[in-house]
Image (tube, rainbow, N blue to C red):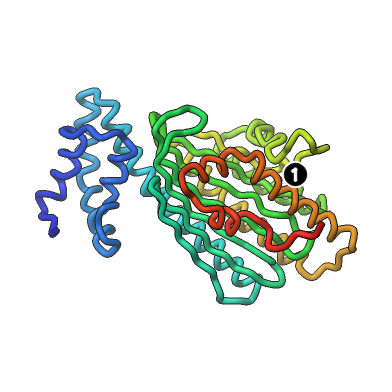
Amino acid sequence: KHPSAALRSSFVIATYWKVRLIPQDFACLASGCFLPAWKRLLFQQSVRYAHSDLIARAALRGEAAAISAWESMENFMEMKNYFSQLNQTALEGFKKLNKTSEVEHKLWKVPAGSWEVNVVRGKVLEKATTSRITLNTKNPLTGEDTRFNVFQVKIYPASPKIPIMLFNMENRVAGDDIFAGFLDVAPAAARKDDLKFLQTKIRKVTEKYGQDYEALRAKLKDMYWMESWDKALNAEIGIRLELGSDQAALVREAGLSWLESYFEIVEKRKRERFTEKQSALMYAVRARIMEYYLLQDLSVKVAQKLGVPLEALSLGHFAPAIRY
């Protein structure tokens, strides 16, 4: 109940060296997940005091697994804090653009973890959402026991001149600690120069960290696509994330840059007039997005199997209105 100074350093040592927890569970335990929120920060600081000594001893002993476990714990805590920052940045941007202070909030607990959705509605961003997801389950692609730490943004603007935001970032911890997901938009009737602006911004971020933008962009091809469609919904101007934990700095800057660049476009286009034809195109794209989620998206199917209610999925991802 009241961790002593000795326990601060011995806890993490005993946890790994004696109990030998798998990395993702070790990361969760060392982050103080079992403590109330007001004690957790102090506990995390105490755990970090032992970090340098443990890494040094693990390196001397050739204990690669121990080092990996500690790195997983650090990445888990860093990404958790980063996703909190992203969530705050997104919600503040939504509220500012819609000139409102109202935020809808819902949290669902399921056996595998939790699913949290925040929604801001208004005349500029008709429906703008953030989703925070933590799940412990098997990776549907690899079959490995995996901890998914996920942050998502979905924005349905009222104007077809503003693209629909498609934003998904995941930190997956299993045998390896990787970043996955994507940053892109569905253009509807967005201007080509606005799409070029987004593309230029994200290209600069990837090149800053020595990554091949075109290779990351190419992985977006046909991401939002079904066989009965003529073309994919997404613009293929952003990046697909399939990166190791050593690229955490790129991932963090890319997420913030994508959000901030998108908000610049909204500010520029929010008062522009649009035609009935452009409006009809926007609603058609909205309908296709829902169709894709319900009929093809693998993550939706996995979430439902884990007991995540359709309400959580629809609140976070479906359009506020569709016209057929």
- Give how far across and how far down residue 200 sits, in percent: 70, 46
Residue 64 vs 178, above or below: the answer is above
Q: Residue at x 30, y 40 (%)?
A: 25
Viewer-nearest residue: 314 or 126: 314
Residue type beneath disc 1: Leu
Left or right for 115, reference 293: left
- Give how far across and how far down residue 60 sits, in percent: 21, 26
- Give how far across and how far down residue 320 sits, in percent: 68, 63
Residue at the far top in the pictured view: 62
Q: Secondary structure at mark 1?
A: loop
Q: Residues within 10 Å of mark 1 (few under 14, many from 20)?
A: many
| Number of marks in picture | 1
Left or right for 323, reference 81: right
Q: Which residue is identified by label 1?
A: 233
Q: Residue at x 53, y 46 (%)?
A: 169
Q: Which quadrant, please, contains the N terminus?
A: bottom left
- Give how far across and how far down residue 161 sits, in percent: 80, 59
Q: Residue at x 45, y 60 (%)?
A: 107
Q: Which quadrant, please, contains the C terminus?
A: bottom right
In which quarter of the view is residue 63 placed? top left
Residue 277 appearing in the image: yes
Residue 256 appearing in the image: no
Viewer-nearest residue: 21 or 267: 21
